Image: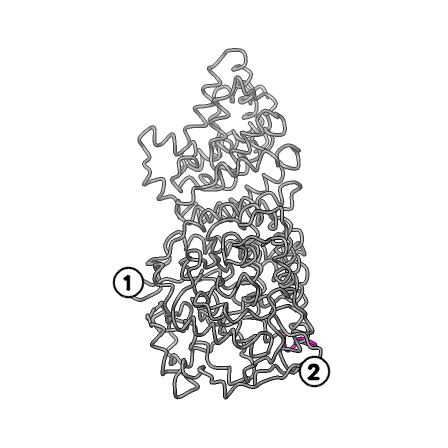
Amino acid sequence: MVGIERKASKMGMEIGADSSHAGGLSDAEVLAVARQWVVRALSAATQGDQGHYMNLLKSLKTVQLDDPSSLSALQYRLKALAQSVSYVSEHYHHMLLALVLGMSVWTYGSDVAEALLEFVVNLATANGGCVSQCLDMLVRNFLPPSCGIPAFLDTYSRTGLMGGWLSMDKIRAQQSDQMARKDVVLNQLHSAIRHLADLVPTAPMRLQPIVLQKMPHKTLPKQWNVLYLENMLRLENSGAKYISNQMLPAVVDQLIQIDVEIRWEDILTEEDTGKVYMFHMDIEDEGDERPIEDREGDENENGDPAGPGIEAKLQYGLMSRSSKGGVPTLDEMADKMDLMMDMTFQHLQICGNKGLSSQIFDTLAKSFQSTILNTYKSKFTQYLLFYLCSLEPSSCGSRFASLLCDIFTSKSRPSNTRMSAAAYLASFIARAKYLPVDVIWTSLRRLASWCASYGTHEIGTRASGNVPDSVLHGVFYSACQAVMYILCFRLKLLADEPDGKRHLRGLHLQQIVEHRLNPLKVCLPSVVEEFLKQASTLQLVDQKHWHASKERLEGNTRSMLVGDVRLDMFFPFDPYLLRHSDRFIRPNFIYWSMVEPLDENGTSDVEDEGYDSLSEASSYVGSPLDEMQSQVGSYESAEAGTLDEEKENFFPILNRQDSGNFNIVERDVDSLEGTGSFCDDGLVESFKHSFDAMAITPPRPGMKLPAKLPPNVSRNPAFRF
């Protein structure tokens, strides 16, 4: 042993693989020599003798990455330090701590990285004052030094830059080699984090703020945002106590920041929203050479024929045109968002396979309420909940719909929050293919019942109480539009359910459309148009409203009672436009092209339950608007005609083209005249019914007729858009 001590003193820690073999020493003996030398250096520093201590620092700095002997010596020194953490003092050895904790596991091989991480874990366990520094070092290793971000540069890179023998170009040139070891490095790194969290109870609560602080800025290259996200999701999925479920809210915050920064090129101007457009889109099968007419009916279209709510899509820039008539090239932010969403979807899928969907839902629901719900123009982040609900529709899907209903009906919530909840509920119920029918019914009943009862206390007796005002009564209009939007997508499904038509008549639809606040004037015209078309076909509302709505839409005029009273509302679950991560959404999504039309005779396949007129249906429902009810008399009801014409006669069409681009063809509404698909006289003329063609349904004795606006009001020009 004396010989070993003499050799250690003489070599001064020049210990490598070759020297150990030359001296005939085993690994344990070499490690013992190294530990003696390290302990002597640490002890001398506490007594004011800096000689040995400075030699130790120098030996840790001067490492040749291309010299196996030098790397082996570094490994022994780090192992010796890991076994000597009780001698380390924050006060006397701060330079040593800065040097070692500044190293990166990406720079060295697995053996050196393992020794380095062992030192970090042992130091945090033995010295509570160093826990935050150790956690900071581990989080800094989420990214390799080759990322070039100053906060993630290691000791070796900083020393090289200061010494002039390294440049940023050379550091970045190491990227391919370092990333080739990504899986090995991350496995070692997160194993150390879990071990540290198990040994130090306070570590998890200190870890989250460090992770948030070091999160790469949203404008940095996508590969570093994605890699950092992968580390966060590894923490979330680690299973370590108190670490799981801490990262997902931070992930949502990061995604929403990137989400709101995404811009589509050449967003349509406000004046364009009053026109009719033809959209052509092919995102997925760019090589598809089939004729357009053969591809329009594809159920798996990525594009959604615009359908109800097209105005909102145009206004919020979710559909746009480029100068070349093609799809706007997704910029770096959108591509980054795509990759990050895909990775988060994979994480949710893993959690679902483990039976953790309900637990994850609790976490995401909190983030939804605090971050997503009130974020203006969030385009993609909300789809995390959409996908999670698809994993357990009867549980998570039902809970999400119920949560949105609760938020909407809560008077303690701000109006904007309640309106957003209505938009989310409408879009979710309409688009989620996986939702059980009972969830759809429950949500619709809550919305419709609230709409029908609105007015007694909210409107009051003010003179302006009957004037449509999308600001004052925005919550009401949002709910009305939600009801109509859901039924645009789901009416056929609900009508075909057992007792479906009877339940539909219980939704107070006639009362809602004839409400004195006139929701038909304020809600989006395309939603109103399609809803009235379908609802009047099933005799759920008077057909006169549909004809009036068509006249307003064809006339391309707007009601301007109190400025532009159109409801400023969007549908957050409109078609998902991120190409790569769309694979998680597409199988669970209802596109407008997938909505089945009603039967030609104006009825569904379900029996009419004995109600052969709208008047009888209204008698079943009842009306809270008696003060506006007209004098009892005959009630006109238009015959059900051929109403299954192609939706493209009314709405913009989203077809697929070989070019893979958006091609927006501007068409004035007037150009539709004379070109209808089901009448030689054209679309407009085909709906100009004369009174001779109207069927008169005499009232039955004692029948209560539906509420109708007074004739002088219904003829008011204000009812035209």
Nearest to N terminus: mark 1 or mark 2 = 1
Q: Is residue 35 shown left or right of residue 218?
A: right
Q: Where is residue 579 in the image (x, y as percent from the top left)?
A: 44, 62
Query: Real-space Cα distance between discs 1 and 2?
Result: 57 Å
Main SS of residues in magenta: loop
Q: Position of residue 492 (x, y in %)?
A: 59, 76
Find the residue positioned furthest to the left.
323
202, 92: nearer the viewer? 202
Q: Residue 660: name its quadrant.
A: bottom left
Which residue is found at the position 38% from the left and 40% from the top? 148
Q: What stretch is highlighted in magenta?
A: 495-500
Image quarter hosting the C terminus: bottom left
Within 10 Å of the Cα at label 1, are there few (<14), some (14-19), or many (20+) other Cα atoms? few
688, 433: nearer the viewer? 688
Residue tagged by mark 2? 610
Mark 2 element type:
loop
In the picture, the disc for residue 655 is none
Q: In this view, does 375 lie above or below 592?
A: above
687, 516: nearer the viewer? 516
Q: Where is residue 380 in the image (x, y as percent from the top left)?
A: 49, 56
Residue tagged by mark 1? 323
